[in-house]
């Protein structure tokens, strides 16, 4: 594997981790909102 391929894979991996973190955060926040009492969810 060439060094350019390794470098590109490094950037792809970082982007993949960032996208996964964003997706997990979205679902976690949605679950939290579902479980809050109605008066707490207004924030």
Image: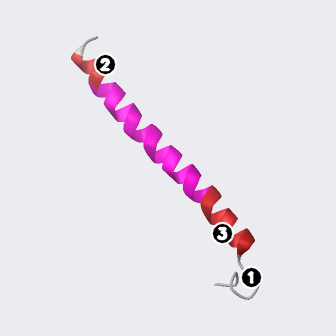
| SS for dot 1 | loop
Pointer 3 or 1: first along the chain:
3
In the picture of the structure, the residue carrying the numbered disc 1 is: 37
Tell me the SS state at disc 3. helix
Quick one: 27 or 7, which is closer to the camera? 27
Residue 22, magenta (yes or no):
yes
| Left or right: 31, with 9 as reference point | right
Residue at 70% over, 81% down:
41
Relative to 21, 41 lies left or right: right
For disc 2, the marked residue is 5
Please say if 19 is above or below 7: below
> Which quadrant is home to the N terminus?
top left
Q: What x and y, as percent, mark residue 14?
A: 38, 39
Viewer-nearest of discs 3 and 2: 3
Q: Which residues are magenta?
A: 7-26
The majority secondary structure of the magenta stretch comes to helix
Mark 1, residues whose alpha carbon is within 10 Å: few (<14), some, or many (≥20)?
few
Circle on res. 3:
none
Question: Closer to the N terminus: mark 3 or mark 2?
Answer: 2
Q: Residue at x 74, y 82 (%)?
A: 37
Q: Quadrant of residue 36?
A: bottom right
**How is the model colour-coded?**
secondary structure
**x and y percent of residue 11 in the render?**
34, 34
Around disc 2, counting alpha carbons within 10 Å, would you say few (fewer than 14), some (14 to 19), or many (20 or more)?
few
Cα distance between the residues tagged 3 and 1:
10 Å
> Which residue was labeled with disc 3?
32
Question: How far across and down, in percent of the image, does residue 32 sit?
Answer: 65, 69
């Amino acid at each position: 594997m060439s060094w350019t391929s390794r470098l590109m894979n490094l950037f792809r991996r970082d982007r993949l981790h960032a996208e996964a973190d964003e997706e997990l955060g979205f679902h976690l926040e949605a679950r939290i909102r579902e479980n809050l009492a109605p008066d707490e969810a207004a924030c």
